[in-house]
Structure formats: C-alpha cells, structure tokens
Amino acid sequence: MSADYFRTLFEYNRWANHRVLDAAAQVPEDDYFAPAAGLSFGNLHATLVHALIAEIVWLARWNGELPPEGLKDARIADKLAQTEVPTFADVRRLYAQEEEKQQRFFAALTDDGAGRIVSYATQYGEPFTQPLDELMAHFINHGTQFRSEAAVRLTQLGYSPGDLDLIVFLRSR
C-alpha cells in the first residue's frame, strides 16, 4: 500500500482521537475515573491510557527503538493509568507529544518504506518480524477499537464525541 494511504489513515486516527479527547475533557473527574461495565480496562481513563500507550509502543518499534521504560505494556493500562499517566492532563500531554513524533514518521514514510520488514520484541521478549504496512493497519484498527469503547462510555455520560467513522472524516477534508 502507498505511503499516502497510511498518511490519510494517520490523519484520520488523529482526528478521531481529538474528537474523543475533546469529549472526555468535559467529563467530571468522578465519572471519568468511575468503573464502567463493558470497558476492557475498567474505566474511561484506563481505556484512553491503553490506546495512548499502544500508539507509543508501536511507533517506537517502527523506529527500531524501545518504548519508554514506564510505558512498555499497554495491556496493563489500568495499572499504568494509576502510576505513569494518572490524570487526564497527562493523557492529553502525552498524546500531543506522540502526535508530533507520528507526524514526523508519516511525513518521512515512502511507498517502499511502507512495505519494509520490522523486527521487534514484545515487552516479554517474544520476537516478531512483520511488514510495516501490516503493523500500521493494526495501529489504526486498534485505535478504532478502544476509541469505540471510550465513545460508548462518553455517550452514556452525555458527552458523545459524535460520529467517528472514517467516511465522515474523509468527507470533511
């Protein structure tokens, strides 16, 4: 697939993240941290932390780097949400930092580069080798899943982020 295709998906991912984060910014703190049935990580905050940490981890892997020490394992987002990213302000700050890094990555991406092979290890040392385009597709799909969970919770609380469909983004450009 072309680098332009993945740049479009990155722009969509950023747009959708902003819609969810803007809605979450309106939620009272007690509701933001309250346990909620149906969320994979227990509450809205930990769900957003999971999505954020996954983006940090994947970009580091694509760049041949290790994720920051405290943010290695998105699967324990409920614990990291208490220790490494304890507030919504931290979520917003880290998303902004990560977006800058992602912007540089996608701006430099070439068609040949999109198909390159990436070797990486999980936080448990398990090695994998996969084409970058598959990993970038996963990155977008993963974000969609957890934004969807967050969007359901936000809507339940009366702060819907609105329609997050890719086609809505594409039509708005």
Image: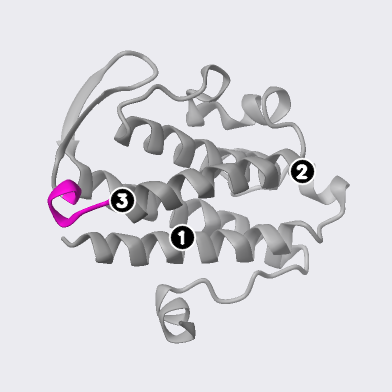
Q: In which quarter of the image is residue 9?
A: bottom left
User: Most prominent secondary structure in the magenta stretch?
Assistant: helix
Among the two numbered marks 1 and 3 on one chain, the one whose residue lies closer to the N terminus: 1
**Amino acid type assigned to the residue bearing label 2 in the image:** Ala
On the image, the x and y values in percent for residue 128 come to: 20, 26
Q: Which residue is drawn at 21% across and 50% down?
A: 133
Q: Which of marks 2 and 3 is in front?
A: 3
**Amino acid type assigned to the residue bearing label 1 in the image:** Asn
Task: Bin the neighbour count of mark 1 within 10 Å (Cα to Cα): few under 14, some 14-19, many 20 and up.
Answer: many
| Residue 89 marker | 2
Q: Is mark 1 on a helix, strand or loop?
A: helix
Task: Bin the neighbour count of mark 3 within 10 Å (Cα to Cα): few under 14, some 14-19, many 20 and up.
Answer: few
- The residue tagged 1 is 13
**Amino acid type assigned to the residue bearing label 3 in the image:** Ala
Vertical relation: 157 (above or below) 29:
below
On the image, the x and y values in percent for residue 146 come to: 51, 51
Q: Residue at x 31, y 50 (%)?
A: 108
Q: Does the magenta stretch include residue 112?
A: yes
